Amino acid sequence: MAETYRCSPEMLAILERILEEDGPQADPTTLDAEEGRKLAESSNWRWNLDLPEMAKVEDLEILSRENHPTRIRLYQPMEYSSGTILHIHGGGWAFCSIETHERASRLLANETRACVVSLEYSLAPENPYPAGLLDCVRAWREMLRLSSQFGLQRPFMVAGDSAGANLALALMLNELQEKMRLPSAALLFYGVFGNQFTTESYHQHADGPGLTRQKMQRYCSWYTNEKHWNNPLAYPLLADDSQLSHLPPIFMSAAAVDPLRSDSELLYARLQGLGRTDLFRLYDGVVHGFMQMSLVLPQASQAFRDAADALRILLPSSDPNSFQESDK
């Protein structure tokens, strides 16, 4: 029998607080895209207060896939050791921004003691697949090319949450396919990797709390059309074993009370079946997007510490506070 996961008392208290503060909110996927984005921005403001101090925060511009300037933000932690992480925000490929994930980027930098580079990418439905992915690929390549100019150090890694985890994994598959430089490691937080809405977690948490099956169906319909429904660069669970076996080391995490939980579990099972030594952590009692809630939810802060610890296991170094570049 499948295990049943429920929200912890702490998680329930936070959800009740949000409802009390905001009242009933519209489903952003049923709104005009711009209205949905405004709602996503306003609902994330509370998680981006009391920002951790950085040694440096700098807004820069790089060229996007069509050679238009696009914004990135560089975070250098107070105790910088080594490494650079390209951080790709989530939001169903349609919502959110550098600002909605400001605190998350800073925590990731502080805990890993690496520079973090957060980026803006083209959002669906106005810019469906492959626009957002190509922006991320271009940002990755530009980050490598301009690393000396920006003062960025190796090893170069990638991270993302939700749709950002999808884009991070797809970026690696794309670079593998095109025989370009791969990240040394990846951090994938509660990602969307498949397009099947009948998994165990979709059955258990079809109606949330928070993310629902219907929301995910609408996000996916915004991001891809039928032409790309079977494309592993859109839905990486469709990648074949030879592709997955050549990926760099990965740390994956999932929220237990999340319709996307099974996506991470299924991907991790496939990676294990290939004899890989990737790492996986399931966080009990929390919902999709919980790492945004680090101001009030202990599991969120712990998740960033776990990610940093995982990198030190995946990329061991003689210095316990830094990383050794992968051979991938």
Image (spheres, rainbow, N blue to C red):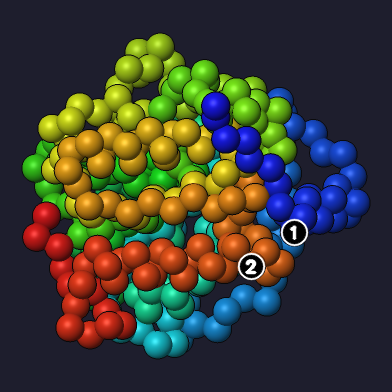
Separation of residues labelled 2 and 1 (CA atoms): 9 Å
Which residue, given by chain and number where applicable, does mark 2 sit on?
Answer: 298
Q: Nearer the viewer, residue 2 or 305?
A: 2
Residue 285 x, y percent position in the rendering: 65, 50
Q: Nearer the viewer, residue 76 or 300?
A: 300
Q: Seen from this angle, which residue lies furthest top? A: 226
User: Which dot marks residue 10?
Assistant: 1
Task: Answer yes or no: is residue 94 visible.
Answer: no
Under mark 2, the amino acid is Pro
Callout 2 touching callout 1 (CB < 8 Å): yes
Give above or below for 81 relative to 119. Answer: below
> Hey, which quadrant is residue 35 in on the image?
top right
User: Which dot marks residue 69?
Assistant: none
The quadrant in which the C terminus is found is bottom left
Residue in the picture at 9% in, 60% down? 327
The first of marks 2 and 1 along the sequence is: 1
Residue 67 x, y percent position in the rendering: 30, 46
Residue in the picture at 13% in, 32% down? 242
Which secondary structure, mark 2? Answer: helix
Which secondary structure, mark 1? Answer: helix
Horizontal relation, residue 42 to residue 155: left or right: right
